[in-house]
Image (cartoon, helix red, strand yellow):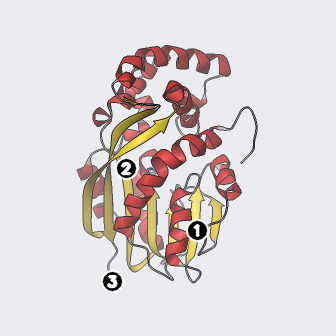
Amino acid sequence: MRDQQRPTPAEVYERFFGPTISDPWTHVLLEYAAPQPGEHVLDVACGTGSVARHVAPLVDTHGKIVALDVNPDMLAVARALPAPAGATIAWQQANAISLDLADGAFDLVLCQQGLQFFPDRTASVREIRRVLTKGGRVAISVWQALRRHPVYETLLTATARHLGTTLATVDVPFSLWDAEELRALLSDAGFQRIEVTPRSLIVQLPAPERFVQLTVQGAAMSIPAFAQLDDAARCALVEAVTEETESVAQRYLDGDALTFPMHTHIAMAYTSST
């Protein structure tokens, strides 16, 4: 990654949220997905590559990994990080709604905290099913409801008010919280043996005094309400929201870290073997 005074939002995301949120949750997702040596794996909405990098050693050199993301800056960070052992990762810019991939090309599709951002979730899930082989499987993680995440709820509620917009405009990461909605998406696409499991983890974020600033910077990649702000507006927003979230954040301070639980749903589903 570039060493500069003003990192890109993708670099901010990787440095601050990669080791603290993405990597721990990747381990949880892979517990359910159980990648096997030699498998062909597709990582949809790969971001800066946490899932793909952790899968590579598990499928070994005989496996294959394709990692897709719509954001070129995220992919640039992913490519710049050290390559893991195991399978070579093919990083590709692509839209999940229409995958330029062959039918039945993969044994396993993974999607960590991406599905809720897709403008057409139904089309994306159908594409995932299309590229899976017979008997293939998908493992998806999406955050549970915003109300289960008080720090983010306070931050995003204050943000929406200061931007003069609705909460729904800024709480996209938490917008696919309903387990039954997730189950229905998979069922309607033709998946079978669908299981949706709630999981929780305690996360620890360093530099709590910069939490709002770094969250706003990171969100600029995927949430238009943040991406459209100029520098002055972003600074004003960070200052105002930091003040409003301070009392809630104080409850979760543990030494020099902001420590709080996060909750997700892990969905596993399979294609027909016939």
What is the number of the mark on residue 36?
A: none
Question: Going 54% across and 29% down the picture, which residue do you hit?
Answer: 216
For mark 1, what is the residue? 66
For mark 3, what is the residue? 273
Return the disc, 2 or 3, that comes first in the chain's sequence.
2
At label 3, the amino acid type is Ser
Contact check, label 2 and label 3, Cβ < 8 Å: no
> Picture coordinates of residue 220 (x, y %)?
58, 34
Instruction: Identify the image quadrant of residue 100.
Output: bottom right
In the rendered structure, the answer to whether residue 217 lies left or right of residue 173 reads right
Front position in the image: 184 or 161: 161
Instruction: Identify the image quadrant of residue 94.
Output: bottom right
Contact check, label 3 and label 1, Cβ < 8 Å: no
Q: Secondary structure at mark 3?
A: loop
- Residue 190 seen in the figure: no
Q: Nearer the viewer, mark 2 or mark 3?
A: 2
At label 1, the amino acid type is Val
Question: Going 60% across and 43% down the picture, which residue do you hit?
Answer: 15
Return the disc, 3 or 1, that comes first in the chain's sequence.
1
Front position in the image: 192 or 209: 209
In the rendered structure, the answer to whether residue 24 lies left or right of residue 101 reads left
Quadrant, the C terminus: bottom left
Question: Going 36% across and 17% down the picture, which residue do you hit?
Answer: 247
Question: Going 50% across and 60% down the picture, which residue do you hit?
Answer: 51
What is the number of the mark on residue 142?
A: 2
> Picture coordinates of residue 82 (x, y %)?
67, 61
> Picture coordinates of residue 197 (x, y %)?
25, 57
